[in-house]
Image (cartoon, rainbow, N blue to C red):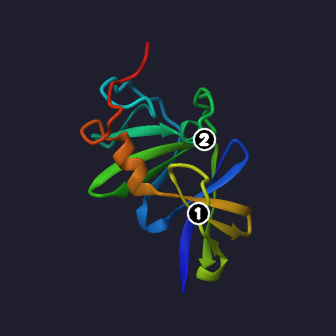
Amino acid sequence: MSRELLVFEIDEATFAVPTSNVREVLRAAALFPLPEYPDLVEGGLNLRGEIVPVVDGRGILLRSRKPIDPADHMVVLQAQSQSLAIHVDRAVALTVIAENDIAEQSGQGKFIKQVVNSDHGPTAILNVDELIVACDPTLSPSSTGRES
């Protein structure tokens, strides 16, 4: 058995999400503030009339944010009937991973589900459900909004 993943880079680290959770990949766009959302959310994206919260991938890594560059990508995800985008340096490829190439999680971080050996080196698979819950102001315990 195998899984299809979308691979992307954040600060030279390689991550992936299951393609079953990917709605689309976009070039970076201007964001607007979403002050009622947790600090992990850097802003909102107007996606054809739908407000989609955007997480800075560096926030997942607990690194400082960088301004959006026109060459960056936004990976729009869908799970639990909700949408969320991740601001990444670049989407790299679609890849298929065999189940025997998947390692167990060993404390890589709150949003890391598993680590796989891909053609792009060790690749952390993000837990999309956990990420969406953490970014939902009605579900997240840290929904105090942004600091000024």
Task: Give left or right: position of 72 versus 45.
Answer: right
- Which amino acid is tagged 1? Gln
Residue 14 placement (x, y as % from top left)? 67, 54
Label whose residue precedes the other's in the sequence (1 or 2)? 2
Kindly identify which residue carries mark 1: 105
Residue 136 placement (x, y as % from top left)? 31, 41
Residue 45 placement (x, y as % from top left)? 39, 36
Residue drawn at (38%, 43%) of the image: 134
Front residue (pair 20, 126): 126
Q: Residue furthest left?
A: 138
Q: Residue furthest front?
A: 107
Residue drawn at (59%, 36%) of the image: 62
Name the image quarter holding the N terminus.
bottom right
Front residue (pair 48, 120): 120
Q: CA distance from mark 1 to mark 2?
A: 16 Å
- Which amino acid is tagged 2? Leu
Residue drawn at (64%, 82%) of the image: 100
Kindly identify which residue carries mark 2: 61
Task: Give left or right: position of 56 versus 22.
Answer: right
Total labels: the figure holds 2
Name the image quarter holding the C terminus.
top left
Front residue (pair 17, 22): 17
Task: Give left or right: position of 62 versus 81.
Answer: right
Task: Give left or right: position of 41 versus 36.
Answer: right
Asked if disc 1 and disc 2 are in contact, CB closer than 8 Å, the reply is no
SS assignment at label 1:
loop
SS assignment at label 2:
loop
